[in-house]
Amino acid sequence: MGNLPTVKDVILAPGNGSFFYDDQAAIRAGAAHDGFRYLGEPLTPGFMTVRMPSRSVSIGLVLSDGIVVWGDMMSVQYSGAAGRDPLFQVEAIDAFTRSVVIPRLLAVDASNFLTACDQVFAYHQGKRLPLAIEYGVSQALLRAAAHIARTTLAEVICSEFALPLPEWPVPIFAQSGDSREINVDKMILKSVDVLPHGLINSREKFGPSGETFREFVKWVAKRTTELGEPGYHPVLHFDVYGWIGLEIGMGAETIADFIAQLADDVPGYRLHIESPADYGSTEAQLDGYAKIVSLLDARGTNARVVVDERCNTLDDIRLFAKAKAAHLVQIKMPDVGSIADTARAVLACKEHGVGAYVGGSCAETDLSARAAVNVAVATQADMMLAKPGMGVDEGISIVGNEQSRLLSILNYRRSQTSTQNTEAASA
């Protein structure tokens, strides 16, 4: 064990996320578009303008054999909203990493992923480390363990959590951003498994009584039939950012009625509605969503409720899964923190028969997205987000190709093991 690579040094590199940080409170309050920017004063602490370029800090672990493995620290598009960590500040993250995290990294056994995470992410001054730091550092630690073991990141997760090597791809979910129509066409032409997200984050996009949104849902289903290959039948998944509750009412019956009506508008499609309402706290969200789920289940509709806001950390996800307060939980990786906790969150959802959607943000990076694929495939999540960015093509390429390469490696490993077993038996 003494000759295993250790962390000899740590280097940091400032970088960019793949989209922007948006002040959700200001947008919800009606901040107007001016080209790509929003006008008006920001409302969420830390924001200098309503829309700001997303930033990242890469952390490189210099291992004793000279190899450098990387992870990316960043936050989500709607930072500081709905109980999330505050806006990502490069200087503050850099300073905290240097003073608190690097000394811990230099003292860990890099070959043991979960133990290393536990040691590096121990509370500091009675508080959890910033989740962006947990997220980026855990990616680097996972890559270190994989390098030492000469395996993929997914195999490290399988080994640590005693999971069988995965054989099946995880369905990919693409998000359209504001360029809805063009991006929906792209998704259909590329036969994406789940689409289009839709970014229904304002009264204008939702419409009075939800009419604008309803028309969009019908249009997506119709377009799928017009453009899709024969037999192509995606799941339709829309994120409404709480607007059903804001526009139509917060009563569980009212919300369930609206969602069931939407499902009737697109017969034969499985419909996901993400964030139908924001009840203002985790406890209220648990209660409200459990009622909506129960009402929809009783009707036998094709519609499913997806929770995002107010269900941020592993503890939150366990609460929602146990209470069946969603059909599907978005495990928003930068909000969960350590990617070990994303793996735990998927397993908690499975334990309670709730769908696990390994999500994240358009504001992430290529590096964090590829790590996410390995965790989603290892734990066999129900779906994963095509990220980063809002361009559709890039996210599908990064996530889809990483998954394809990973499954090819795992199939090769299986064939090698089976050949060796056959040779051993005949010897």
Image (cartoon, grey):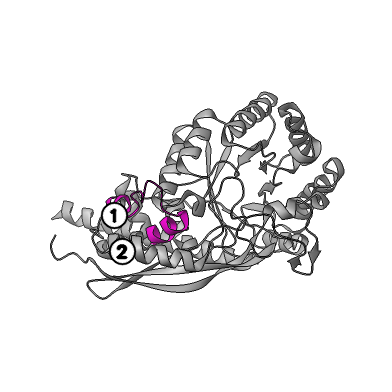
| Mark positioned earlier in the residue sequence (2 or 1) | 1
Tell me: 1 left or right of 337: left
- The circle drawn on residue 144 is 2
Q: Amino acid at mark 1?
A: Ala
Q: Mark 2 against mark 1, which lies toward the viewer?
A: 1
Find residue 344 and report its horizontal and vertical position in percent: 41, 43
Tell me: 334 left or right of 59: right
Q: Residue at x 18, y 64 (%)?
A: 4
Q: Magenta segment, which residues?
A: 115-139
Asked whether residue 340 is drawn in magenta, I would say no
Dot 2 lies on which element?
A: helix
Viewer-side residue, 253 vs 391: 253
Find residue 424 and report its horizontal and vertical position in percent: 16, 54
Residue farthest toward the bottom in the current orientation of the protein: 66
Q: Residue at x 24, y 58 (%)?
A: 108
Q: CA distance from mark 2 to mark 1?
A: 10 Å
Q: Residue at x 17, y 51 (%)?
A: 425
Q: Amino acid at mark 2?
A: Ala
Residue indicated by mark 1: 116
Viewer-side residue, 150 vs 95: 95
- Residue 253 higher or lower than 326, as above or below: above
Q: Residues within 10 Å of mark 1 (few under 14, many from 20)?
A: many
Tell me: 109 left or right of 211: left
- The quadrant of the picture occupied by the N terminus is bottom left
Asked whether residue 137 is drawn in magenta, I would say yes
- The circle drawn on residue 388 is none
Kindly report the secondary structure that dominates the magenta region of the rendered protein. helix
